[in-house]
Image (cartoon, rainbow, N blue to C red):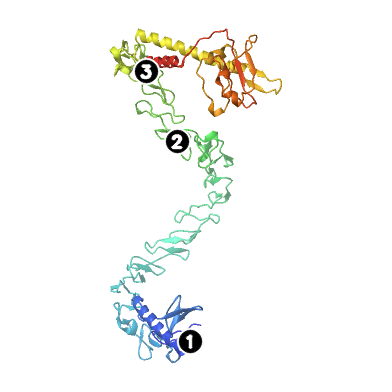
Amino acid sequence: MLTCCRGPTEVTDQRGMSWEWTLLLRYVFVLLWFTWVLLLPPSHSEPVLFLYRSSGLVCCSGWGQLGAECLTPLCEGNFTCKENEVCVRPNECRCRHGYFGASCDTKCPAQFWGPDCKGKCNCYPNGQCDDLTGECTCNHNRWGPNCENPCTCQKGKCDQETGKCTCHPGVWGPQCNNNCYCSINSVCDAMTGRCLCNPGWMGRNCALQCNCNNSPCEQFTGRCLCRERMWGARCDRYCQCVHGKCNQADGSCTCTPGFRGKFCKEPCPAGFYGQNCRNRCGHCKGQQPCKVTEGRCITCDRGWNGTRCDQLCSKGFFGENCQEVCPTCKDGHHCDPIYGKCSHCNPGWIGDRCEVRCPNGTYGENCENNCSHCFNGICHVVTGECLCDPGFYGTYCNMTCQPGQYGVNCNQTCSCHDKNCDPVSGACYLQPNQRMGVIAAGTLVSFLLIVLLSLLCCCCLCRHKDDHNKKAKRILCGRFSRISTKLPRIPLRRQKLPKVVVAHHDPENTFNCSFIEPPSVAEQNSPSSWSSQESFSSFESGDEGPVYCVPHEGESFLPISVNLIMEIVGALSYAI
């Protein structure tokens, strides 16, 4: 429920609150009132207190709600304002602007305005002031801000701001002092006094009627001005132009753009547009027809733009919608606007867009010159200057680098003994004794590689199938197995294989390979019974027992020591 009061006054509880709560609310309201006084904008003359409850805004007594605030003073009961009064504060009335007196029933004199008639009217006695704003309203014979200027209009009204006359009907002139002599079928021009005839009338005074079959005529000559679709001296003939207008004299048609023919029935053929189809369409894409009335194209062909596709691409651009940038043509010339081709290229370049450098051996404009004067190199594609290959120098690249120099234009110095290096790469030349060592080392390395490859092939080819367990065994067999017995034995500790050496062999079997049971623990501790310099132990590949291959005793082999191999490899490394 909304309860209103003025200022810091008591708020009564509608629901019957105890005096303790009433006292507490008084202190709260006093605090809110002082806060409101400090924060209230200067435009408000009275502090207004309002309280928000769960049910909505509650205004103090004497104040009414206006929007979201309590800003409307209330004068109620015995304090209700009279006819010419307004409520300015709760239960306080004052006279309305323009009235004064104890009962506010007396209107302010003409020379005063405002509250209690305290404002003085500046336009008195030549006008009246507005009671609320004091703005002047001049009398009919005065004009100006304060109605200080007299009006010179004899039969008319003055503009209050400019003093310009607005004449009464039948009067004309700057001061409305001239009488008009026009008939009732016309209007008098207030500035010139000329009679302006109504449609269908003619003559100086508009007293004569036109003879134009309900069409208007010229005021002074009487020549008929035919209405649309009519022609003839009296506008009595019907126009037959379908898409156009008739000549009023002879009835000939003037076609609208996009049509042609005697009666403007034929539309423009494809590729033409405009008045009588005289204009040719621009470069519409795909030879599409343009709009017959104005020649517009939907899209343009390459190299053209504009609404009618009749404008070439701007210089420096080409292609679809002129969005591609021209390449660099000779001397800054612009490319073809359609495909972007250059008519001439700068020296050293060829191609439709000058994007291809001259091939090796040619230079100059259009790559027409031959680089035959450069013996060991190529020439610059623009100037033809020789660019020598590494190892050569000179104007024509016909001189080899001096000893100790190498590279492009022989600008680099080598650090070889006696400055004996390759003029191209700078690699040092070998002495005769060094050259022989390298050859020998290369031969030996090749031989070792052949031996190793042969061993690998033998491992793949020599396989034996066990008749009892039918499991494949990898066997090193033949003559190469005897060679391998002289190589250092490499213990296969990670394989955890028994180290067993066999001292006997079968003389009738060239490849004496057999399956032998592994020795017992006691036998393994007796090296004399399980040792041989010409035997070779195999490795275990997941089968139950080891495999052994024994060479013939009578055959010889080439002993190769590890130290010898290491010396050869070291010598080869030093020589290289």
| SS for dot 1 | loop
- 90 and 401: which one is in front? 401
30 relative to 290 in the view: left or right? left
Q: N-terminal of the two: label 2 or label 1?
A: 1
Q: N-terminal of the two: label 3 or label 1?
A: 1
| SS for dot 2 | helix
Q: Quadrant of residue 412?
A: top left
For label 3, the residue is 363
Residue type (three-letter) at the residue carrying disc 3? Tyr
The residue carrying pointer 1 sits among few (fewer than 14), some (14 to 19) or many (20 or more) residues within 10 Å by Cα, namely: few
- 258 and 227: which one is in front? 258
For label 2, the residue is 322
Q: Quadrant of residue 439?
A: top left
* Res 294 visible: yes
Tell me where residue 385 appears, x and y as whole percent.
32, 17
Residue type (three-letter) at the residue carrying disc 2? Cys
Instruction: Please identify the quadrant where the C terminus is shown.
Output: top left
485 relative to 564 in the view: left or right? right
For label 1, the residue is 13
Gap between marks 2 and 3, in whole Å?
33 Å
Query: Which label sits in the foreground, 3 or 1?
Result: 1
Gap between marks 3 and 1, in whole Å?
109 Å
